[in-house]
Amino acid sequence: MLAVSLKTCPPPTTARRSIGPGGGHADATVEVARPLAEWLDSLPIQSGGNQNEGGSSDAQPPDAQQPQNSGGDNSPLPDFGSSECVTDLTRLEVMRHELSRLWTSPHSLRSSGAAHKLDDALSRSMEYSACLTECLRRNLGRSHVPSLVLPWRGAFVDTAHPLEREVHFGHSLTFEQYAVLFNIAAMEGCRASRFARSALAEGATQMERTKGLKGALDGFGRAASTYAHLRLMVERDTAEAARVAASEEQQAEDETETTCDSNHNCSANAAPKEPMAAIPPLSPDLTPGALHLCESLHLAHGQMCVYRTALLRPRPMHAVLAKVAAGAADLYDTARAHLLDPTPHDVYGAGKGGGGTDSENGGATGGAGGQQQQQQPVWPNLVSTLSDRVTSSWDGYLRAAGGTCRARAEWHESFSAAGKDKKDAVAELAAATENGDNAAVALAKAKQGDDAPPGPHESARLRRAIRWTDDAATALRMVEGGTVAFNAILGPGAAEIMSEEIRTMRASVVDKLEARSTSSTGPKDREREEGQMQRDQTDDDMLDLPPVIGQNMMKRLPKIHSDLDPAKLKRRMFTTLLGPGAKRVLLGFRSQLGTSLESAAKAAQRETDIARARLAGVNLPQSLDAYRASREAGGGVPPRMWEAIERVQSNDEIDLLKRNLWALKDVADHARSTLTSLVRHLDDDVEADRLFREENPSFRGHDAAQVQDPLRGQVRNWEGWLEQARNGDEKLLCVLNEFETEPKYQLLQCTRGQLEQLIPGRRGDESSADTGDIDTGALRASLEDLSNLIRDRQSIIEEFKAKAEAHELRPILVEINSSFMGQEGATGNDAANWPPTQAASPTPSIGVSSVEADFPIKVRRFEEAANAALQAFAPYLEKVQSHNAHQNLLMERILKENALFREALDQDATANRGQDYVQKLEDALLTVERVKTQLTEGRNFYDVVMPRLERLREEVSDLSARLVAERLEFMDRMEMSGDQEERRQREQSDAELAAKLAKEHNVTDESLPRQSTEELRRDEEVAAEMARRFREEQNQGASGESGSRTDQRQEEDRLSTATAGTGNTLSNNDGDRDIPSEQSVVERASNAENEATPVSHSSDALPTSEDGAHTGNNASDNDEMMAARRVSPAGVEDSSNLDREDGPHRARTPPPPGQPGVYHVSNDSAPLVRVDDEKLARFVQMGFDSEKARKALQRFDNNESQALEDLLSGM
């Protein structure tokens, strides 16, 4: 039994795969599927406005990786991103890659030794389909996504012609599921065929045959159920899409009408009707016609399994077998009808048939009823989408299979007919006995014997069976491409198997018919029986033989496999996703944790800034460091300080810092001006859109403010970053001014001798009592404690931040959600309710499954888990608060110690000498080092900012250009609609004028008589004669001026003589030559005909043809006229062979190229094509024969590419 071919998909790679033959279509390339995780990651997910959670006062460049999802309202996937389901998407990608390898060679799955391979492919396909169903339940990839590319090759293809293996691209997981379900049904059919082959194999026992046929019956029924389920899915989805599109279009029309009514200027402002939203494109094998065909085909296969099972009975019930075989034939005929149905399928009608009540369908389409009448979306019929070879092969198979089943039905019905013939023989014997006719009695007894020839009804049934087998064999012979094409399309050996079945059936019928017909004993009986057979053959149509009524045994079909239910997956999909309640708890937990971290960091930073400000107010620790340095050096400039000063002077760091700060200022100003121009550009686009809509109220294009939302979000983010960086820039620019004015930076340019004079050392006459050191140990210890406290507090904040970022509450919530999954899914995932019907609940929102509703107790468990996780971070907050309190006590102690130090320092004259200069130098060196560090950070920041601002500017420009293009297209459509309206009015006016003229022309009175057929023929002959004379004059002019004048004068004299006395000579516009009148031309034509063929008006004088039929000039003329009307494009170039001497004949042939003339045209004749001389010249230059090139151009209507292909194919 024939199984439908599988759809194949190229394995996903990163290369580009060509779908054309080698070198023939090098540019016909397609890009194969991108990884699903990468596709989902590439969706334009918007950010919810991230803030700097670290609380740092310094500006930092934004993270290079955009956030996966923020849960914002503008996000297309508000409930989950690729980071949350990357494992599931990777699993889908791996499954698709493995299945593509299994589907690459579909014929290998049908071999007898590939049973385990087929079972494995079927199991994997069901798992993949269940995963896709789970994705679609969450609206993941349900609609058209341009970035998702899933290539598929069709099933109804010719493997002998690779060009016909068209690749169809799906841009949604819906299309992917359609294709996978198609393959699941096809593999179910393959497995059922394997069971059938094992049952019909030689040597199989009765039990093996019964078991095999039962498995085949179940398989074919499940395949038919899957095809029916897929067909209903396709019809329902496409009908719903069409209804939505029609409703949207009707709503747009209503808005347009409202606008027109308010403006009272509908013709000027009304927008043209937009085309209906496209129905999701389907490959030919996924259209309802193809799925109907596959469904009926597998139902017929299952019916044949019932038939073969009934044959296994010890005593076959021929009446039942005949009905079952006839039912199988009906199913094959139904499949053939779907194959050859020329009528496109209505999407709305299919949607109604797909499920739902009439009221529901009417309500769904009621809002768009007017539009449906104008523009009905349809699927193309199957016969128009398949190639001729594929259609011919399938038609031949279905016709042959149906004919074979009809022959089987007639074969079994012949046994019932034999019983009827015997009853008739008994009645005939009784009548003959009653009449005493011995010969009739003997004949009636002979008909009742076991070896008696078949009766009229039985023989008629057998002969009808023979005719059905002959018709089946003829159907196979008529397949386009023969056996090779049949096997290439329907599978290896399909033609041989079908032919052998037909031959076997016919041989059985013929054997039965001939064996009983030749069983008589004598030659006279044989002759009498042969004559009777001939009479029966002639009288078959006279018998009242009713057709065998089929009985459909496949009305009750098994359900589709339960493994297609996502609830039956051993490894569930999207187990890490959460419902809305869990997400609210998770977002609340993250918000509270972030708030706690931010408050702790801000409090710590505030305390640190307070401590630094209070220390700077008392000149700590610079005064302490300067005193220590002067004491270590015995006075004068400290050595380490001089080394730093010397390094600044040698590297010219002050001037270098000045230049770098000016460069940083320029870059910052450029970044802010760029951002300001972007904002102004966006505002200008919004204002332009507003003004355009005011001028054109019917414009329904994209709203500029809405489409700018993502870009404005990015602009706001960059404004925040630049505003945060402004503070650091201003501080650096203040230092730039201080470099010019502050004296401490001038000290860095002094020599060591100059500094020694400002900071003198101790003199030798000073006593040690006067130079005693001040005790600064307590002050140093307090400052060290403060530094350690600030360092420890910062480490606590960093540890808090790291733990908060690393903490994952999601696994805990997922575990809690999984514990409730069984309770929530108990009613929705029962296998008894699979597959879901159209009356099921509406599709849930994205990311939320219908079995993940949040129970109150579960939400309470979520909240408890979140609170427990928050309590784990409480110790960090307590530590920060403790450090803040300890800092206040430590600062009081430092200030007291510093007061004592300053009092002692004021009393020491030696230590106080030059102390101010040391502090200034120390402060200047620290500022230089800090500025260098901040300058490096600022350069790095703007190195990241400027390229991204440039990209943002390009995006803004592109968006602006698209908006402008949309408005220009609208204006073009408006102008086009105005032109179309003007043209329509002009055509209507022309039609009215034509109708008026036709009405006037139809008036037949004495003042306006109509021309007769004879008068029309005369006009034609006059025009032909005028054209002939003009061409003769042209030819004469080419031969010589003198000869032309002589011939012209002779012709004029001859014509003037022939038309003398008529007074009906016409003159042309120039007045240099005369045109013969209509009467003269008619007389010349009549004389020429009389001279060529004498005509007699008597019937006896008419010439006859070979068979004696009368012919005449009129008949010949009519034949030539009909031949001229029926001239084909291929025969136009042979028109030169026609008679060109007489006017009427020349009127029926086109004039030579380049010369004027009149010739006969008709609606029945093919159009005459004039060859383009330039194209002909190019072909001659290429080396082609001029005559062949002219014929090719004329045949293809001057199409240069088609003519070139024709010339190349003929070489």
Image (tube, rainbow, N blue to C red):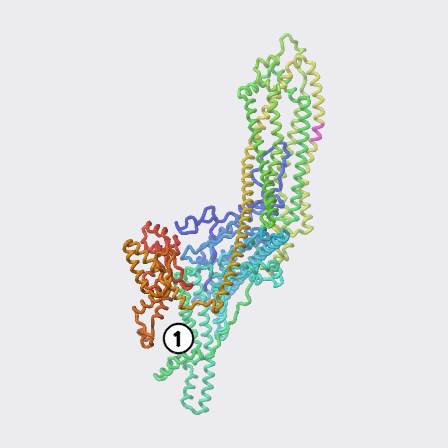
Figure check: 284 above or below 65: below
- On screen, residue 81 versus residue 906, left or right, reads left
Figure check: 1061 above or below 646: below
Q: Which part of the image, by quadrant, shows the C terminus?
A: bottom left
Residue, far bottom: 436
Q: Is residue 313 magenta?
A: no
Figure check: 834 above or below 775: below
Q: Which residue is mark 1?
A: 511
Residue 1153: quadrant of the picture = bottom left
Where disc 1 sits, the SS reads helix
- On screen, residue 764 versus residue 520, left or right, reads right
Does the image show residue 1195? no
User: In the image, residue 883 lies at what x, y percent?
Assistant: 69, 31
Disc 1 marks a residue whose amino acid type is: Asp
Q: Nearer the viewer, residue 331 or 1113?
A: 1113
Q: Residue at x 51, y 52 (%)?
A: 170
User: In the image, residue 1021 lies at what x, y percent?
Assistant: 37, 64
Figure check: 629 above or below 283: above
Q: Nearer the viewer, residue 361 or 494?
A: 361
User: In the image, residue 646 lies at what x, y percent?
Assistant: 55, 18
Q: Nearer the viewer, residue 184 or 1081?
A: 1081
Q: Which part of the image, by quadrant, shows the N terminus?
A: bottom left
User: In the image, residue 909 lies at what x, y percent?
Assistant: 67, 12
Does the image show residue 145? yes
Q: Main secondary structure of the magenta part?
A: helix
Q: Which residues are magenta?
A: 884-888
- How many callouts does the rendering have? 1
